[in-house]
Amino acid sequence: MSTHLRLKFGQRIRQLRLASGLSQEEFADHVGFARTYMSRIETGAANPSLDAIEALASALNVRVAELFHTL
Amino acid sequence: MSTHLRLKFGQRIRQLRLASGLSQEEFADHVGFARTYMSRIETGAANPSLDAIEALASALNVRVAELFHTL
DNA sequence: ATGTGACTTTAAGTCCGTG
DNA sequence: TCACGGACTTAAAGTCACA
């Protein structure tokens, strides 16, 4: 039940989102997610599906594998 | 709505599961999933969560990033 | 040994708000 | 601008029967 990965994943998403210069809400709109859901993803509270992970990677212009390289 | 990734992900899981010499049912037991759910994952019908993906990687003794390297 | 349909239970994901 | 909560709605997760 390790929430490690969710936490690290969220931190990674935030890192890349900040690098893109977007606010959480702007980015959420871009991905097509609710802003509250983006918050929960970045804080590690959410457990996103593969489709959701793919949407995040796509919005960040990186491949899914790159989201996990550092973890 | 691209199911591409789910399909490719399922194929990758099946590839690694077969390489380990386990049947779908044996592997499902090892991961802690229902056999029918494993079938859906491998066929791309299921949209597994990050926690589920982590459990699969763990059972296969690979890092999550490795599951996505080839996709 | 695997895929699928029909089903129930749990959690993902949305939308309203607050500090 | 973001974290967090409550009350939703939709889909993931798991069970069972059958081909």
Image: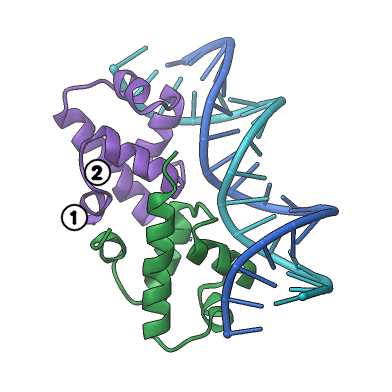
Chain colours: A green, B purple, C cyan, D blue
Q: Is residue B2 visible?
A: no
Which residue is painted at 43% across and 73% down in the image?
Answer: A14
User: Crowding near pointer 1: few (<14 within 10 Å), some, many (20+)?
Assistant: few
Residue C16: image quadrant is bottom right
**Residue beneath label 2, please?**
B12
Which residue is painted at 56% across and 62% down in the image?
Answer: A40
Label 2: chain letter = B
Q: How many marks?
A: 2
Of A25 and B15, nearer the camera is A25
Q: Is residue A17 above or below residue B33?
A: below
Amino acid type assigned to the residue bearing label 2 in the image: Arg
- In x, y percent, where is residue A19? 36, 84
Amino acid type assigned to the residue bearing label 1 in the image: Thr
Marks 1 and 2: CB-CB under 8 Å? yes
Of C9 and C5, nearer the camera is C9
Left or right? Give the position of C12 relative to A61.
Answer: right
Left or right? Give the position of B64 relative to A1.
Answer: left
- In x, y percent, where is residue A22? 48, 86
**Residue beneath label 1, please?**
B70
Residue D6: image quadrant is bottom right
Both marks 1 and 2 on one chain: yes
Label 1: chain letter = B
Local SS, label 1: loop
Of B19 and A6, nearer the camera is A6
Which residue is painted at 35% across and 55% down in the image?
Answer: B5
Q: Is residue B65 above or below residue A57?
A: above
Which residue is painted at 28% across and 41% down in the image?
Answer: B57
